[in-house]
Image (cartoon, rainbow, N blue to C red):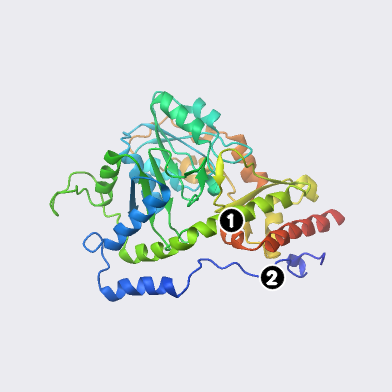
């Protein structure tokens, strides 16, 4: 083993790259076929869009799937269609992308942060239950990194308090909870097709549901308030044009041919990498066996203990690991409630009471994950070989040996 870290001029442990997105001539031809047809729009020329929606619904095991411009809009449409009203509270996790919170504000509702589980980094059902008040109307569990939340507990709490559940499955394409696809368990499921996602067309989103009334309302909201059977210039609800294009749908339909294989490969590699990293002192893989039967590993996350690495900061460790050729990142530097949006209350909404004060929010598990523990390996790296997983572990051991010998 070459012991000098690549960051300081040594040889990289991992020499190969992990390209993303993965495509071939069939993807190019799928898009070119739409271009040649001259029928690019939706809904006027939306046959390919409908084909994609039907295919995605079948894949997820839901009655309906409705495409839209991105995952953020998918969450917003689902929340509004679920009937929230200004001033209602929505329980969310502090360890997620900003959109999970900002769409709540856009709906003139109040985000309420419930801390995460220390083993999985998903929202902790015990904390969700504590956060419920008479103003709570919905829960948005985020299947972070593609690891399924404890949906049995969340659905039980929702049923007991008459709450809506919107699954944020933007990391969870193809992943499963007790044999059910993520996005098929709550009232609605939301997906993103942004460029980093496990299924991508650069941008785009999808909402899945088994509820016919909910589907009809979301369909209207994404299509400028029109309703099925209505006239073109007849608008019933406060919708907007959130429609996806034929070109995106053609690309996604073709990309879906790879999704099952890619998801299973990420799952297998993640399981194998867990077995390697759990042998390294100071490195702890996140918990498995809490309901997920298929993990999509949009991110592979492990916990880093700097005391076993001569107190090397998490940021410096992640920088050294990336230099070794492992596609990785230190993760979120802070929980959502510490963002300027919340600290400065730049909500631009009329329904957020003045006494709402996020400076008093404290989620210790999420803060520890952000400040000290969590390191992310990106999903494209999880499409490598078993040998690549061994090299990732080797790179960590190389760094540990170096810093502990200084």
Q: Please give the name of the residue rendered at 53% of the width and 48% of the height, measured from the top-left corner.
A: 146
Q: Inspect this view and state whether residue 59 appears.
A: yes
Position of residue 352 measured from the top left corner of the image (x, y, whole percent):
37, 34
Q: How many marks?
A: 2
Tell me the tag on residue 266: 1
Position of residue 162 measured from the top left corner of the image (x, y, whole percent):
38, 26
Q: Nearer the viewer, residue 308 or 153?
A: 153
Q: Nearer the viewer, residue 183 or 131?
A: 183
In this rendering, the answer to whether 138 lies above or below 393 is: above
Q: Nearer the viewer, residue 127 or 296?
A: 296
Tell me the tag on residue 15: 2
Q: Please give the name of the residue rendered at 42% of the width and 48% of the height, measured from the top-left corner.
A: 60
> Is 282 placed left or right of 167 in the picture?
right
> Is 210 placed left or right of 91 in the picture?
left
> Is 36 placed left or right of 16 in the picture?
left
Q: Please give the name of the residue rendered at 29% of the width and 44% of the height, measured from the top-left corner.
A: 215
Please identify the quadrant where the N terminus is shown.
bottom right
1 or 2: tag closer to the N-terminus: 2
Disc 2 residue crowd, few under 14, some 14–19, many 20+, Cα 10 Å: few
Q: Please give the name of the residue rendered at 26% of the width and 44% of the height, measured from the top-left corner.
A: 216
Q: How far apart are marks 1 and 2 (CA)?
A: 20 Å
Q: Inspect this view and state whether residue 376 appears.
A: no
Disc 1 residue crowd, few under 14, some 14–19, many 20+, Cα 10 Å: many
Residue pushed farthest right? 405
In this rendering, the answer to whether 136 lies above or below 223 is: above
Position of residue 251 measured from the top left corner of the image (x, y, whole percent):
39, 66
């Amino acid at each position: 083993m070459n012991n000098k870290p690549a960051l300081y001029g040594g040889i990289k442990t991992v020499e190969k790259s992990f390209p993303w997105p993965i495509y071939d001539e069939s993807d190019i031809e799928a898009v070119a076929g739409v271009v040649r047809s001259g029928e690019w729009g939706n809904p006027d020329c939306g046959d390919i869009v409908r084909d994609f929606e039907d295919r995605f619904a079948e894949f997820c095991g839901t009655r309906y799937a409705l495409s839209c411009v991105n995952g953020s809009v998918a969450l917003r449409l689902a929340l509004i269609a679920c009937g929230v009203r200004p001033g209602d509270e929505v329980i969310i996790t502090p360890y997620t992308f900003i959109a999970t919170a900002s769409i709540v504000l856009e709906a003139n509702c109040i985000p309420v942060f419930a801390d995460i589980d220390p083993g999985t980094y998903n929202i902790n059902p015990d904390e969700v239950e504590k956060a419920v008040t008479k103003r709570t109307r919905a829960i948005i569990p985020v299947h972070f990194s593609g690891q399924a939340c404890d949906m049995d507990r969340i659905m039980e709490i929702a049923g007991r308090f008459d709450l809506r559940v919107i699954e944020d499955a933007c990391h969870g394409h193809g992943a499963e909870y007790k044999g059910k696809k993520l996005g098929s368990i709550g009232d609605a499921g939301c997906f993103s097709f942004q460029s980093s996602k496990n299924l991508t067309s650069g941008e785009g989103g999808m909402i899945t549901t088994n509820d016919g009334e909910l589907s009809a309302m979301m369909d209207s909201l994404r299509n400028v308030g029109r309703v099925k059977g209505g006239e073109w210039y007849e608008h019933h609800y406060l919708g907007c044009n959130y429609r996806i294009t034929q070109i995106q749908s053609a690309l996604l339909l073709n990309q879906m041919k790879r999704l099952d294989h890619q998801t299973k490969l990420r799952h297998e590699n993640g399981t194998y990498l867990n077995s390697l990293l759990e042998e390294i002192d100071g490195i702890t893989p996140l918990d498995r066996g809490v309901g997920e039967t298929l993990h999509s590993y949009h991110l592979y996350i492990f916990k880093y203990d700097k005391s076993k690495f001569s107190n090397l900061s998490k940021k410096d460790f992640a920088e050294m690991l990336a230099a070794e050729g492992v596609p990785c990142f230190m993760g979120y530097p802070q929980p959502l409630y510490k963002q300027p949006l919340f600290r400065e209350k730049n909500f631009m909404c009329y329904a957020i009471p003045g006494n709402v004060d996020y400076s008093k929010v404290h989620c210790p598990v999420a803060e520890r994950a952000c400040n000290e523990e969590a390191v992310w390996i990106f999903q494209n790296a999880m499409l490598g070989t078993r040998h690549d997983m061994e090299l990732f572990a080797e790179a960590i051991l190389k760094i540990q040996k170096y810093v502990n010998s200084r």
